[in-house]
Image (spheres, grey):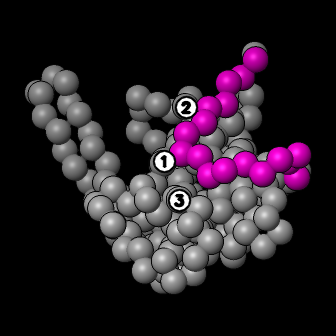
Amino acid sequence: TQNSSNMFSMDLNYIRSISLRNNITLYSGIKRFTIDIITPSVSVESFEPSKNNSFANNLDMPAINENFRHVKYCYAYGVVIKADNKHFNKWALVKKDVCKVDSDLSWLVDNHYPSEAWFVPTPNSTREDDGVLMTHVFDGIKKESYLVLINATSMQTISKGILPTTMPYSFHGRFFSDV
């Protein structure tokens, strides 16, 4: 039975069944909530879909450059399930630009299922998008998992390494610097 949380859609039975996964309805939309602690008030900002990556507004599990937390930032990175709004095998990692229209970028490989990505900033960088996205991905064709590093500026693969075991899809992880 489907429910509004769509958590069931991450079950391997859904991922492995074309008919089940393609019939899942997903909800979309991204908003920025700004809390003014002086007044006190909350403002809500919505974003127009990008022409070049219309699915970027459907991102979930967003990550930002943590060095920009508590200041106005422009980039949010996240996972989009059903990037074409039809096929469950089209998952993408997106870079949503919340400051400029039509500047969104994406990383998408059919039948590859990325987990929540973490942004790892380049040490001593002052550019918000200077760093890498790091996540593990399940390759649905080869039935294996790999760790991928993606250039957060261009959304191009830097490197990937096959993992010694199959990693299930996971929602949350965390990168900790040893510096």
Amino acid type of the residue that numbered disc 3 sits on in the rendered structure = Asp
Q: Residue at x 72, y 23 (%)?
A: 177
Give the image quarter of residue 57.
bottom left
Write the start and end of the magenta stretch as one range: 162-178
Q: Nearer the viewer, residue 33 or 16?
A: 16
- Which residue is rendered at x = 65% and y = 57% of the image? 114
Residue ID for mark 2: 66
Q: Which residue is mark 1?
A: 62
* Label 3 or label 1, whichever comes before in sequence order: 3
Placement of 112 over or under 119, stated as above or below: below
User: Looking at the image, is 22 positioned above or below residue 48?
Assistant: below
Secondary structure of the residue carrying tag 1 is: strand
Res 155 label: none
Place of residue 9 in the rendered image (x, y in percent of width and height, measured from the top left): 47, 63
Residues at discs 3 and 2 in contact (Cβ within 8 Å): no
Q: Residue at x 60, y 36 (%)?
A: 173
Q: Is residue 175 covered in magenta?
A: yes
Q: Position of residue 137 (x, y in %)?
A: 72, 56
Which secondary structure class fits the magenta region best? Answer: loop
